[in-house]
Amino acid sequence: MHAHHKSKVVNGSIVVEGEPLDEGTVVTVLVSDEHGFTLTPEEEATLLESIAEADRGQFVDARDVLKRLP
């Protein structure tokens, strides 16, 4: 199951807002800063869905994509 939680770094540790996560929960961290990226809520939802698809093995290998390029 995938859920989206906002978090921030406090004293070098990532602090997740909202309900505590279960011990051993695997998380994906996306980092943005002044040199990073800004996503609209729609873009963020698309990115998170793409990550979920990749986690389920639903992705195209980059080599296959590159072979199809002219």
Image (cartoon, helix red, strand yellow):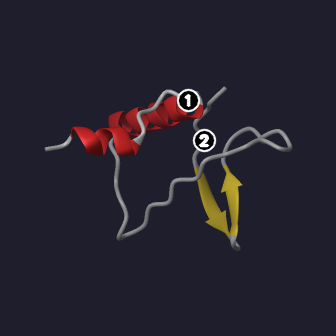
From the top left corner, tell me how far across and down residue 18 is, in percent. Answer: 68, 41
* Residue 28 higher or lower than 52, as above or below: below
SS assignment at label 2: loop
The residue under label 1 is which amino acid type? Answer: Gly
Residue 52 image-quadrant placement: top right
**Residue furthest front in the image:** 67
**Residue furthest bottom in the image:** 11
From the top left corner, tell me how far across and down residue 33 is, in percent. Answer: 42, 67
Residue 46 image-quadrant placement: top left
* Residue 33 higher or lower than 45, as above or below: below
From the top left corner, tell me how far across and down residue 16 is, in percent. Answer: 68, 50
Q: Are marks 1 and 2 in contact (CB under 8 Å)?
A: no
The residue under label 2 is which amino acid type? Answer: His
Residue for point 34% across, 54% down = 38
Residue for point 67% across, 26% down = 1
Which residue corresponds to mark 1?
Answer: 57
SS assignment at label 1: loop
Position of residue 45 in the picture relative to residue 14 (left or right): left
From the top left corner, tell me how far across and down residue 45 is, in percent. Answer: 42, 33
Which residue corresponds to mark 2?
Answer: 5
Question: Quick one: quadrant of the C terminus?
Answer: top left
Measure how far apart labels 1 and 2 are at the Cα level: 23 Å
